[in-house]
Amino acid sequence: MSDAEEALEMFRQLRPALVVTDRIMPGMKISGVDLLRLVQREDPHAAVVFLTSYSSPEILIECLKLGAFDVIEKPIHPDKLLASVARALEQHSRLMSELRQSPASS
């Protein structure tokens, strides 16, 4: 994917359960943080794993407040990313199951 705008358009078309995004996105019309905000606004149940090479407590807190499932600092260890993705998808699956089982509100 070339930039966050393209990623957002793909998200709107495919509605994936999981989005993995970087803080710095090519093109910089919208950032990874902006993409996180937009994804959560359009689908608050989507799991977002956020990648960053500029880790700070402020970035971590901001991303988690915006709804990121996890924030992973670069360089990324493949096992850590895979474990985060597996946990995010498991949580998403549980949430969707609970939502399907709950009675519809009137």
Image (cartoon, rainbow, N blue to C red):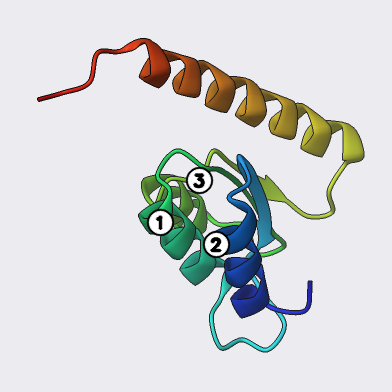
Residue 36 visible? The answer is yes
Left/right of residue 63 with respect to residue 18 in the rendered view: left
Residue 3 or residue 23, whichever sits in front: 3
Residue occupying image coordinates x 44% and y 57%: 58
As drawn, the label of residue 62 is none
> Identity of the amino acid at label 3?
Ala
Residue occupying image coordinates x 62% and y 30%: 88
Residue 16 or residue 37, whichever sits in front: 16
> Identity of the amino acid at label 2?
Arg
List x then y, in percent, for residue 48: 58, 46
Query: Which one is earlier in the sequence, the residue at label 3 or at label 1?
Result: 1
List x then y, in percent, for residue 81: 79, 38
List x then y, in percent, for residue 86: 73, 26
Rate crowding at label 3 as few (under 14), some (14 to 19) or many (20 or more) other CA atoms within 10 Å.
many
Find numbered disc 3 in the image and state the secondary structure of the residue it sits on: loop
Residue occupying image coordinates x 77% and y 27%: 83
Left/right of residue 86 with respect to residue 66 in the rendered view: right
Query: Which one is earlier in the sequence, the residue at label 2 or at label 1?
Result: 2
- Of badges 3 and 1, the one in the foreground is 1
Residue 51 visible? The answer is no
Tags 3 and 1 in contact by the CB under 8 Å rule?
Answer: no
Q: CA distance from mark 2 to mark 3?
A: 18 Å
Tags 2 and 1 in contact by the CB under 8 Å rule?
Answer: yes
Find numbered disc 2 in the image and state the secondary structure of the residue it sits on: helix
As drawn, the label of residue 12 is 2
Query: Which one is earlier in the sequence, the residue at label 2 or at label 3?
Result: 2
Residue 46 or residue 58, whichever sits in front: 46
Residue 29 against residue 60 in the figure, above or below: below
As drawn, the label of residue 68 is 3
As drawn, the label of residue 42 is 1
Residue 77 against residue 63 in the figure, above or below: above
Q: CA distance from mark 3 to mark 1?
A: 14 Å
